[in-house]
Amino acid sequence: MIKNIFALAVLCFFLFIPYTFAKDVASAKLEAEIDDEFRWLQAEAVEFVTVATKTKVTAQDAPSVVTVITGEQIRNMGARNIIDILRTVPGFDFAHLGLYPMHTAYVRGIACVSSEKVKFMIDGHSVQPFWGEPELHFDRLPVTNIRKIEIIRGPGSALYGNSAFIGVVNIITKQGGDEPSRAGLEFGSYNTVRPYAELSYKEDDLTAYFFAEHYQTDGYDGVVESDMASDFYGFAASESREMTSSLRHSTFHSNITWKNIYFSAFFQDADSEAPVGVNGVLTNEDEMETYYGYGELGY
């Protein structure tokens, strides 16, 4: 009887070991798959930025107050231009200038006149002119080709020089394969029209992205009854005149990479008319034509 019980116990032991071993292997495999899934989800959730250190770090580890706005967020907010986007950033605001057809940035209550306080960049390339406001072109940058915007809300002069006294804005554009190719046409009041097209391609080691846009509007057609010269040191009242606030600009942008070789280019031609002249005096000599562009080839 004892021998039978002992034999039965030995048999159950050897039958149970493979089952337990198989169960442990299955559990370990499932736990490994769950860990991999969590690591993947965590990597997708973490936002990496380069604006704070010029190296790739997470937004949480960046040694600055950094705000990141993605292309998806831009589409969801229905932003028409860069100004609409940056107005959603805490501490940022923009006031439209009546003298010129552009905006002045206010960061934490400080007005950024003459372009020496906030650094504006496209893919790390400065939009800052030698003199004057970067907003002349910054206002007109298209939002369709933006992958994300990285913003330092605070000083960044240690990395970017004296133009980054109270903030840095770096617009990062799309690369080939980020989104499908597409074209569109927008129109609105005052004969406003905006056709655009973007070509996105990715195959093996080659990625190519091309973007082109044209924007044109007649602007607000109000009438100015009198100007600064109406009662200025005895000048006679000027005649009323329709405001001239038309704007036309064309933009071209490309990003091409092949293995370790890359080429990036941007060009914008803008032609605008100021609503009124210097110091609020009416004038017909108010047309401004400006160009901005860059090209970079690297390895």
Image (tube, rainbow, N blue to C red):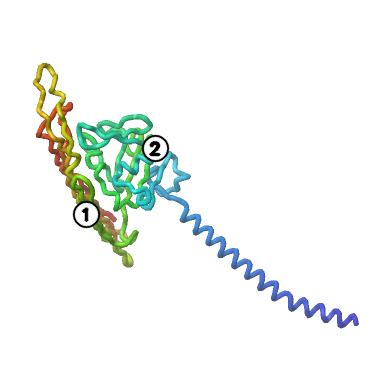
Residue drawn at x 62%, y 70% is 26
Q: Residues within 10 Å of mark 1 (few under 14, many from 20)?
A: some
Q: Is residue 231 visible?
A: yes
Q: Could you say where residue 213 lies in the image, as x and y percent from the top left?
A: 22, 53
Instruction: Name the residue rendered at 28%, 33% in the picture.
Output: 116
List the residue tagged with mark 1.
Answer: 195
Question: Which residue occupies the foreground of this view, 238 or 48?
Answer: 238
Which residue is at the far right?
Answer: 1
The residue nearer to you, when weighing 93 against 11, is 93
Q: Secondary structure at mark 1?
A: strand
Give the percent coordinates (x, y) of residue 22: 66, 73
Give the residue type that dot 1 points to.
Pro
Local crowd at mark 2 within 10 Å, few (<14), some, or many (≥20)?
many
Where the C terminus falls, by quadrant?
bottom left
Can you identify the residue that label 2 sits on?
A: 153
Location of residue 297 in the rendering, given as x and y in whole percent from the top left corner: 24, 54
